[in-house]
Image (tube, coloured by chain):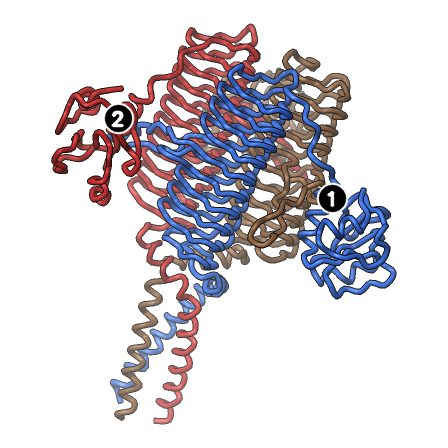
Chain colours: A red, B blue, C brown
Amino acid sequence: MATLRELAELVGGSVVGDSEAEVTRVAPLDSAGEGEITFVASAKYLPRLQHSRATAIIVTPGVEQPGRNLLVCRNPYLAFAKVLTLLQGGRPEPRGVLPGATVHPGAILAPEVTVHPGCVIGDRVQVGRGTILYPGVILYEEVVVGADCTLHAGVVVRERCRLGDRVIVQPSAVIGSDGFGYAPDGERYVKIPQVGIVIIEDDVEIGAATCIDRAALGVTRIGRGTKIDNLVQIGHNVEIGEDTILVSQVGIAGSSRIGRHCTFGGQSAVAGHLTVGDHVTIGGRGGVTNDVESNQILSGLPVMPHREWLKAAMTFSKLPQMRKEIQRLKKQLDEFAMKLKEM
Amino acid sequence: MATLRELAELVGGSVVGDSEAEVTRVAPLDSAGEGEITFVASAKYLPRLQHSRATAIIVTPGVEQPGRNLLVCRNPYLAFAKVLTLLQGGRPEPRGVLPGATVHPGAILAPEVTVHPGCVIGDRVQVGRGTILYPGVILYEEVVVGADCTLHAGVVVRERCRLGDRVIVQPSAVIGSDGFGYAPDGERYVKIPQVGIVIIEDDVEIGAATCIDRAALGVTRIGRGTKIDNLVQIGHNVEIGEDTILVSQVGIAGSSRIGRHCTFGGQSAVAGHLTVGDHVTIGGRGGVTNDVESNQILSGLPVMPHREWLKAAMTFSKLPQMRKEIQRLKKQLDEFAMKLKEM
Amino acid sequence: MATLRELAELVGGSVVGDSEAEVTRVAPLDSAGEGEITFVASAKYLPRLQHSRATAIIVTPGVEQPGRNLLVCRNPYLAFAKVLTLLQGGRPEPRGVLPGATVHPGAILAPEVTVHPGCVIGDRVQVGRGTILYPGVILYEEVVVGADCTLHAGVVVRERCRLGDRVIVQPSAVIGSDGFGYAPDGERYVKIPQVGIVIIEDDVEIGAATCIDRAALGVTRIGRGTKIDNLVQIGHNVEIGEDTILVSQVGIAGSSRIGRHCTFGGQSAVAGHLTVGDHVTIGGRGGVTNDVESNQILSGLPVMPHREWLKAAMTFSKLPQMRKEIQRLKKQLDEFAMKLKEM
């Protein structure tokens, strides 16, 4: 529970209406009621605001709703995130190592950790203060997990990989699986041992069933603050910069380097051994097959400037008609050529 | 074991030949032998029928095979499903909570459940009668699972998500992972807590390693009877209608609504915040980037009518040649223009 | 630790320099130092060789680096794999069944196996000598795992599936999940029980979170030596030949047969009920929608010869311009037609 005054302080905004009004929950615009706060981030939803029964509404400056409690701030979406974080309460109380967990005596657990049943923690593992391991998390030998991390059920981190602080890993993600490396020996393939590691820096989030392969030699690195969605594949020796976004089902092949503050749309991909600059956006299902300079928006396979791709994609269905037209033009020209000769 | 007479009753068909003949197993056309029943759903496999050593064959009306035991019915494929279901026997006997499972004292388990070793069931969880939880299933707090469900090994269902009756979940699927939602704060991203849930309605099946994200606020919903294949991604706040089919590696981005009785081919995708009507078929790897009306068959990226796409795709390889032809036509025309001037 | 003389014997090469020099580790070219060996597989990295502080370098015949210890052999990449395998040491010592594992009394474990905590092994399972099951591996009833296999954490193998010898399975892979088979019954779908199995032959490697569905009837088979990357989908009744490579996020739909020594690039796919020959390479995101003969390199959707696809893809962005040019040509021709009439 919080008053609007408290929330205004939290988000750096101001209250129009009753600043002592109390809210306990955040709810969607259409269903919010008594004691609930909602938000309007886009002007197109403003008309629906007047029917809302919410106790308070987060809006941008300039919105007028007489008789309403408004929490006015420049970035309502960000304010929504902060208010929601506050109202949902803090992290669960630490519970220690619960019965049914298996912790190697050589593991070092900081105070205030929670280790749920079904977890298996190997020798020489280190887990930082306040970290929560949900049921069935498996940490191989010498894994290091920082403070205040949340590893959800079924997450596997293989030997010697390292996670920073405040890292969140959704269920069944795999960190440190072997990279896909084989040396051909005639028609057969000989496995190249993958003896490197994965380093996940602070404030990274990793989606459910996402796989991040360990380096062959050296390090696969995910930069601070980067957010990775579900079912994403990161190959061995990949390096991803800070604050980059990888949407679901993206694939980054081995040894490629992605810059900072990039955004990769769903199902997009980067081939191996490439470099992508900073502030690059790749549209959904874009396929990067060459190095990419910074500050671009690209789509298609292979990628091209997004606007170019949009136009080409819109013309694609005209291809058969274009082909017919070219045939017709050729025929017409041939006829002209005949006529000209005759003249 | 069943007689052909019993099977004919089960599938609503009739027997040609010995209706007291007994079969114990279903087998493929080419390998079926004594005591086995097979089926021919497509006319093109009929020639192979005469070499079969099966005790009985499920066929459509009109097929004649003198001296053979035939189970004649209108839908042999459906009959095959029903016969196979009967012959493989019912669900395993309920075994209760097996040693090695961890069940919170606050959980409520109906009679006749089976909870295998390695399962972890949280506080205030409810599990319905006859449901089987295979080893390593993790149910977070307040999860509700209906009756006669089958959750295979390693399935994770996060807090407060709800499954109906007769739901089948293949191994390592994740239900209720956090949606992918962040509010930009300068160059960094602030996580938006995902406090909604997932509701899986009756008779849904979910494939291995498929991920269904919980709603930010509200509900991600999978409609009754919908079947989802492996490695599919369902974003937060998605709603999918009844009896819809999502083939492997499909991705449905956040807040999109898919109608009933749709079919999505493998690796196809829907961008966020879109609406797809009922009875829509999207071809393999189709990409939906706008709302789609009901009763259509679409393919391509972005999607277009399937036949249009087929023609365009078939013309694609001619592009370089078309371009050359256009250059040639331009040149020819320029020459004509010269000649005309000279005349 | 090994001398260069020992390593030369291992890889079938020769030493230039001090054949008694000892190395303990393999390291990348740029960071290798005292006691470390590195390799140069490609001529383009040769210039960087002179700055290396490595004790020894694996090179092809003809490379001259006076004053350096060289391990000269025809296939440095293969030699690198072999040296790395030797230096990283053998498999961990067998540890038996560790506390926290659940092994059914009806299971048969060969000597020298290791079963980590959290594993659950069902009735009538057989596990071969020297095999390691990392924490949380689940083997359903009657599974057979050969000798010297490595099943990483969270791997699930469902009932009756069979793995050969020296099979490696990365974390959270699923073997034997139900195939995606339903018989339409009006608008609803009736599940077809999937009663077949999966057979994984010797020396196969399977990536993290990869899913291999059991056959409806019969067998889904992965041929000897085939290597499958992460997040790959293999449908029911698929057969894959020997020594084939499937890169990450590939999808092979049900009942398709892939030959031997093929390579499928990332995110590529094969539709159902198709046959792909031997020695076929499918480029990244290629989509196979028809049978494919042996000995081809194909790309695109649907696939076409790779070079053709490259040219067409490079022309794609010119589509809108080509369309305009065709309009212009038509107009010009119409004008000529007018002029010709007037003449």
Q: Position of residue C107 (x, y in %)?
A: 75, 22
- Note whether B85 is above or below A213 in the view shown: below
- Label 1, label 2: how far apart the Cα atoms are: 59 Å
Residue B286 screen position, x and y as percent: 46, 52
SS state under label 2 = loop
Residue A231: percent from left, percent from top: 48, 35
Numbered badge on residue C218: 1
- Chain letter for the residue marked with disc 1 in the picture: C
Q: Nearer the viewer, residue C191 or B249?
A: C191
Amino acid under disc 2: Gly
Q: Residues within 10 Å of mark 2 (few under 14, many from 20)?
A: some
Residue C330 placement, left or right of B50: left
Please say whether residue B205 is visible from this viewpoint. yes
Q: Are marks 1 and 2 on the same chain?
A: no
Task: Please state if B37 lies on the left or on the right of C213 as rendered.
Answer: right
Residue at 64 percent across and 27 percent down: it is C82
Report crowding for label 1: few under 14, some 14 to 19, many 20 or more residues within 10 A (C-alpha). Answer: some
Label for residue B305? none
Which residue carries the number 2 mark? A35
